[in-house]
Image (cartoon, rainbow, N blue to C red):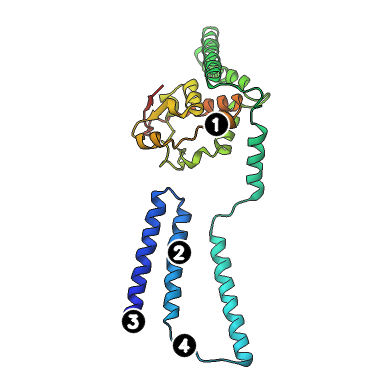
Amino acid sequence: MGKAIIKIIVGLVIGAGLYVATMAFDFPPVFRWLFFGYAVLGTVVFLILDAPTMKVMSGGKALVSLLVFYAILCTVFISGASLWPQYDPEDEKGKIVKILKGKPNILDPWKADEVIARTKELDLKAKELTERIKALGTVQGAAGQDAGAAAAVPASAAASGGDVLKIGEEQWQLQECYNCHKLKGEGGKKRGPELDNIGTLLPQEEIAKKILDPKSYKAEGFDVEYEKGKMPDKYKDLMELKDVQALASWLATFKNTSVNTPKPIKMK
């Protein structure tokens, strides 16, 4: 009995060590528990090795016992597997197709500076239209038209006939930004800052600049993540200009001052 207790303690210690190690490497929670489960399973195996030998069975009784054992084993494995997150291959395939379809032509590349300049130009036009609408209409009418004008210009940079904000939200999902950033109470925020108030802290063109050049801004309190380059420098190759602008426009609409979004520090 004493040996069994020691083995259980050792197994739990190893499992806890694996859990902490995987957590340090930012493994998803499901994989942390998976490694812990392996340690527990190994402990159970060692306990079984010390168990008393079963009586020898033969004939029909042995066959029935074997079938019952395999039935229990299969039930446990199938039930356990059903508890893990299930991935739809067609959904993942759709994401890959969208990314490849929207990839810029390598024979006609565009640069980040050109994208930023174009975004600034569009932002200025939006502001000019806003002022003209305010001058022509009443305060209430101007407020309603202001929102339409502000969205109309970025939409011209998005795909033809598309809603820029809808495309921006789609890009958020497609590029899986939620893996590192928390927004609207969803997603993670360990690798990157929460973004519910990013529209108050950065204008649209600067958000686009950050997407294209992750080193252009550093979130306050995220020095280690910045130095390690947690935000990948790949979106200028994966995303088209219209998609970058759409995503930046969508993020710029989030101005929830009750959320403590870290202050962006300009680095370039």
| Gap in angstroms between the C-alphas marked 4 and 1 | 61 Å
Mark 4 near mark 2, Cβ–Cβ under 8 Å?
no
Q: Earlier along the polypeptide chain: callout 4 or callout 1?
A: 4
Q: Is residue 95 left or right of residue 132?
A: right
**Element class at badge 2:** helix
Q: Residues within 10 Å of mark 3 (few under 14, many from 20)?
A: few
Cβ atoms at labels 1 and 3 below 8 Å apart: no
Numbered badge on residue 37: 2
**Looking at numbered disc 2 in the image, what kind of residue is underneath it?**
Gly
Q: Is residue 41 above or below residue 160?
A: below
Instruction: Assess whether mark 1 and mark 2 are in contact (beta carbons under 8 angstroms).
Output: no
Real-space Cα separation, disc 4 to disc 2, in angstroms: 26 Å
Q: Which residue is mark 4?
A: 53
* Left or right: where 74 falls relative to 262: right
Q: Secondary structure at mark 4?
A: loop
Three-letter code for the amino acid on which mark 4 is drawn: Thr
Q: Residue 204, image x and y in percent?
A: 49, 22
